[in-house]
Amino acid sequence: GFSCGHLTNARTLCASILNEPGRDQKERTLVFVKTKRQADFLCLNLCEEGFPATSIHGDRLQSEREEALRYSLVISGID
């Protein structure tokens, strides 16, 4: 399992980065979390709130990983 508390903090941090005043919309942010499952969960939460985010990890096809790099926020599971 994983701690929802840690992901809540990560979600809050990601949202504050994306909502930063004067932030260049072309700017990209890459966030690393511990597992692929956490990456997908955090991405889903942010997308449900309307943030342009995607996850990237080894379970994705190479073409999906390349496409993911076009998003403003990319969340990578490192397991």
Image (cartoon, rainbow, N blue to C red):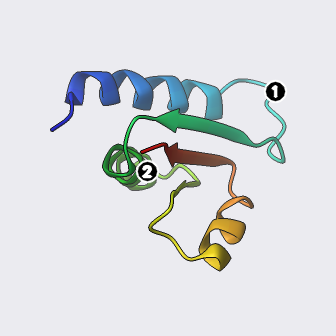
Residue drawn at x 56%, y 24% is 16
* Depth order, front residue of 79/69: 79
Residue type, numbered disc 2 = Cys
Task: Check the image and report above or below for 25 versus 52.
Answer: above
Secondary structure at numbered mark 1: loop
For label 1, count other residues whose C-alpha is less than 10 Å away and answer few (under 14), some (14-19) or many (20+).
few
Q: Which residue is mark 1?
A: 22
Q: In which quarter of the view is residue 18 placed?
A: top right
Q: Is residue 19 left or right of residue 27?
A: left
Q: In which quarter of the view is residue 4 placed?
A: top left
Q: Which residue is mark 2?
A: 43
Q: Position of residue 49 (x, y in %)?
A: 41, 48
Residue drawn at x 84%, y 37% is 24
Q: Position of residue 15 (x, y in %)?
A: 52, 32
Residue type, numbered disc 1 = Gly
Task: Check the image and report above or below for 57 versus 49.
Answer: below
Find the residue positioned furthest to the front: 79
Instruction: Give the tally of numbered discs.
Output: 2
Q: Quadrant of the N terminus?
A: top left
Residue drawn at x 43%, y 46% is 46
Q: Position of residue 48 (x, y in %)?
A: 37, 54
Q: Is residue 19 visible?
A: no
Marks 1 and 2, how far apart in space?
23 Å
Q: In which quarter of the view is residue 47 placed?
A: bottom left
Q: Earlier in the sequence, mark 1 or mark 2?
A: 1
Q: Quadrant of the C terminus?
A: top left
Q: Is residue 9 visible?
A: yes
Q: Is residue 43 left or right of residue 41?
A: right
Residue drawn at x 53%, y 49% is 51
Secondary structure at numbered mark 2: helix
Find the residue positioned furthest to the left: 1
